Amino acid sequence: MKKINAVIFSAFVAISLFACKSKTNPADDVQAIKFKFTELGRQTQFRMICNKFDFYFPEAKEKHFDKKPGIDSVMQLLTNLKVVNDGTEPDVRGKIYITHSNKAVDTLCVGVKLLNYKGVVYETPQELLALIQK
């Protein structure tokens, strides 16, 4: 009986410790962020889609963030994005590449009004545009 109680107690302690483990901040696993962009107000004859951005703007400007304060400021802007469900897509003027510590890369396609992140369209935060143009 003592063995069963000891096993149950050990299992309870292990589960409790696992449940109390602090949640990691999503920005903590981000290793680097790269902005690749052209002039945000640049006019084109047609809507620019994400997979054609590099083709039409091969000499786009780049900005890199690899220090924690810069990464945190970008990731903060990407929290609480407002979803847009009206079927529109961004007129892409830039891309943001988020490289995680496991080397996985997330790509955001950014337009002046909308951005696409993981297949979902959101309003582009104006603070993000200001940071890109800085």
Image (tube, rainbow, N blue to C red):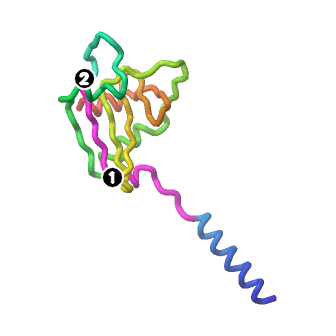
Q: Is residue 22 above or below residue 54?
A: below
Residue 86 percent coordinates (x, y): 54, 18
Circle 1 packing at 10 Å, graded few (<14), some (14-19), many (20+), is some
Cα distance, mark 2 to mark 1?
28 Å
Frontmost of labels 2 and 1 is 2
Residue drawn at (52%, 57%), measured in percent from left and top?
23
Quadrant location of residue 34? top left
Q: Which quadrant of the rendered structure holds the C terminus?
A: top left
Residue type, numbered disc 1? Gln
Please state the extent of the stretch shown in magenta in the rendering: 21-39
Q: Is residue 26 left or right of residue 131?
A: right
In this image, 89 relative to 22: left or right? left
Q: Residue at x 33, y 40 (%)?
A: 97
- 25 falls in the magenta region: yes
Q: Secondary structure at mark 1?
A: strand
Pointer 2 residue: 56
The residue where tag 1 is placed is 31
Find residue 21 and report its horizontal and vertical position in percent.
55, 64
Question: Could you say whether the residue bearing mark 2 is in a helix, strand or loop?
Answer: helix
Q: Going 55% across and 23% down the picture, which residue do you hit? A: 85
